[in-house]
Image (cartoon, grey):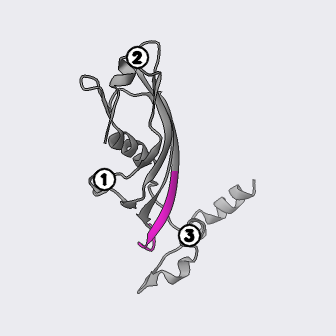
């Protein structure tokens, strides 16, 4: 969805309100770690600074569904971000337009964690000759330096 910036650029209005609820099209996140993305609530505005550059101030909140890093189950992951910067890349200057979906997606993708899990009991993840262990178990188990690490942790 493109936001028309012509009223702002012609100095007809002082600011443009971009507050609202936006549904990001699936094409934006279909090749990412995001399984689904709820509507994003945005509260913000676009103004022009003294150099006639478009300045965006906004807060966005929403909810995305990711795959759990351990169990591979779908998990709801809330996100929020604040943005306060000059908008140059997503503004089509010759057309006086801002692609709000592209702008929102570029900032949402920064909120996607590399790994995310809600699994607390690792004991049920095991198989023939293997089991899932925590970082603490790994640190002291089968480590030739475990005695040195115990002394180091005491300090």
Q: Is residue 74 magenta?
A: yes
Residue 144 image position (x, y, % from top left): 56, 66
Q: Nearer the viewer, mark 3 or mark 2?
A: 2
Q: Which residue is mark 2?
A: 11
> Could you give the CA–CA distance between mark 1 and mark 2, rounded to whole angstroms?
32 Å
Please, which residue is most extreme toward the right here? 155
Which residue is pictured at 60% across the width and 66% down the height?
Answer: 136
Nearest to N terminus: mark 3 or mark 1: 1
Magenta-highlighted residues: 69-79
Callout 3 secondary element:
loop
Counting residues from the start of the chain, the first of labels 3 and 2 encountered is: 2
Across and down, in percent, residue 68 comes to 45, 68
Between 40 and 69, the one nearer to me in the picture: 40
Please give left or right for residue 96 compared with residue 14 in the image: left
Position above or below: 135 against 44: below
Mark 3: few, some, or many residues within 10 Å (few <14, many ≥20)? few
Find out whether the residues at labels 1 and 2 contact each other: C-beta distance under 8 Å.
no
Label 3 to label 1: alpha-carbon separation: 37 Å
* Coordinates of residue 14 in the picture (x, y in percent): 47, 21
Residue 107: in magenta span: no
Q: Is residue 127 above or below residue 117?
A: below
The image quadrant where one finds the N terminus is: top left
Identify the residue at horizontal 58%, vertical 73% (top origin): 120
**Label for residue 134?**
3
Question: Mark 3 and mark 2: span between their CA atoms?
Answer: 59 Å
Q: Nearer the viewer, mark 3 or mark 1?
A: 1
Q: Residue furthest top?
A: 50
* Depth check, front residue: 135 or 42: 42
Which residue is depicted at the point 48% across and 65% down? 76
Name the residue at the bottom extreme. Answer: 128
Q: Which one is earlier in the sequence, the residue at label 1 or at label 2? A: 2
State the mark number for residue 25.
Answer: 1
């Amino acid at each position: 969805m493109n936001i028309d910036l012509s009223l702002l650029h012609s100095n007809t209005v002082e600011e443009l309100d971009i507050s609202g609820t936006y549904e990001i099209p699936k094409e934006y996140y279909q090749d990412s770690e995001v399984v689904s993305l709820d509507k994003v609530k945005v509260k913000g505005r676009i103004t022009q600074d003294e150099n006639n550059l478009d300045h965006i101030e906004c807060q966005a909140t929403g909810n995305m569904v990711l795959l759990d890093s351990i169990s591979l189950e779908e998990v709801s992951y809330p996100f929020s971000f604040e943005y306060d910067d000059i908008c140059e890349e997503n503004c089509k200057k010759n057309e006086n337009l801002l692609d709000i979906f592209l702008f929102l997606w570029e900032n949402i993708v920064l909120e996607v964690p590399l790994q995310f899990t809600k699994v607390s009991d690792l004991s049920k993840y095991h198989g023939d000759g293997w089991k899932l262990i925590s970082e603490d178990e790994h640190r002291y188990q089968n480590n030739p330096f475990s005695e040195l690490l115990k002394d180091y942790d005491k300090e």
